[in-house]
Each structure stands twice: as C-alpha cells, then as structure tokens.
C-alpha cells in the first residue's frame, strides 16, 4: 500500500479496533509490525487510510491465501471472509 497514510492490523486479538496495532512503513510501499499472539487461529484484516479513503477501509491480506469466513453477509449475499494466521 504505497499510497497509504496509515495502516493497522485488526483482529479479535485487539478487539477489531483500528489504531490499536499500527504498522510502520518500510521501503517499497511495504508496512510491517511484530505481534506476539497466543497459540491458535487468529482472523485478521488491515485497516488502511489513504487519500481516497480518509476514514479508512478494511482489506484482507493479499499475501496470505489462508481465509476464514467472518459470518457477515455482504449486500450481494456473499459471505465475507478474513485472513487467517495460525500458530
């Protein structure tokens, strides 16, 4: 997300609250953070703020193919999903 102003990782581990776990910008438009999570499955998403979306928007992790259904239906009737990390 090279054009992002701020990115946070959100999940059950931080109450799905943006700004609780901000990422730091790195070279080439990448963002990073180090999280210590308890063992188990952790659904998550990124909260991204940029010029086009100053209020922010949710985004799954495009680098992680592991997904889990969120249980929330989209307006089109599809079930939404989160990225998933297990460990």
Image (spheres, rainbow, N blue to C red):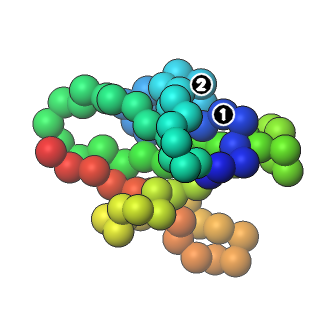
> Which disc, if any, is residue 19?
2
Q: Position of residue 5 (x, y in %)?
A: 72, 36
- Label 2 environment density (alpha carbons within 10 Å; few <14, some 14–19, many ≥20): some
Q: Quadrant of the C terminus?
A: top left
Q: Residue 75: x and y, percent? A: 72, 70
Pointers 1 and 2 in contact (C-beta within 8 Å): yes
Compared with residue 21, is residue 79 higher up or lower down, i.e. above or below?
below
Looking at the image, which residue is at 44% across and 37% down? 32
- Left or right for 72, reference 51: left
Q: Secondary structure at mark 2?
A: loop
Q: Secondary structure at mark 1?
A: strand
Residue 60 visible in the snapshot: yes
Q: Which mark is residue 24?
A: none
Residue at mark 1: 6
**Residue 41 image position (x, y, % from top left):** 23, 47
Q: Farthest top residue?
A: 20
Q: 10 Å neighbourhood of mark 1: few (<14), some, or many (≥20)?
A: some
Say which label, 1 or 2, has the lower sequence index.
1
At a point 65% along the width and 49% down the height, the residue shown is: 2
- Depth check, mark 1 against mark 2: the one in front is 1
Quadrant housing residue 51: top right
Q: Residue 64: which quarter of the image? A: bottom left
Q: Is residue 84 rendered to the left or right of residue 11?
A: left
C-alpha span from label 1 to label 2: 9 Å
Instruction: Choose between 47 and 24: the one closer to the eye.
Output: 24
């Amino acid at each position: 997300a090279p054009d992002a102003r701020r990115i946070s990782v959100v999940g059950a581990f931080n109450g799905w609250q943006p700004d609780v776990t901000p990422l730091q910008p790195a070279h080439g438009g990448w963002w990073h953070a180090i999280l210590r999570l308890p063992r188990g499955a952790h659904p998550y998403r990124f909260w991204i703020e940029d010029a086009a979306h100053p209020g922010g928007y949710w985004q799954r992790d495009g680098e992680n193919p592991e997904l889990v259904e969120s249980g929330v239906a989209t307006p089109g009737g599809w079930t939404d999903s989160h990225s998933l990390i297990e460990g």
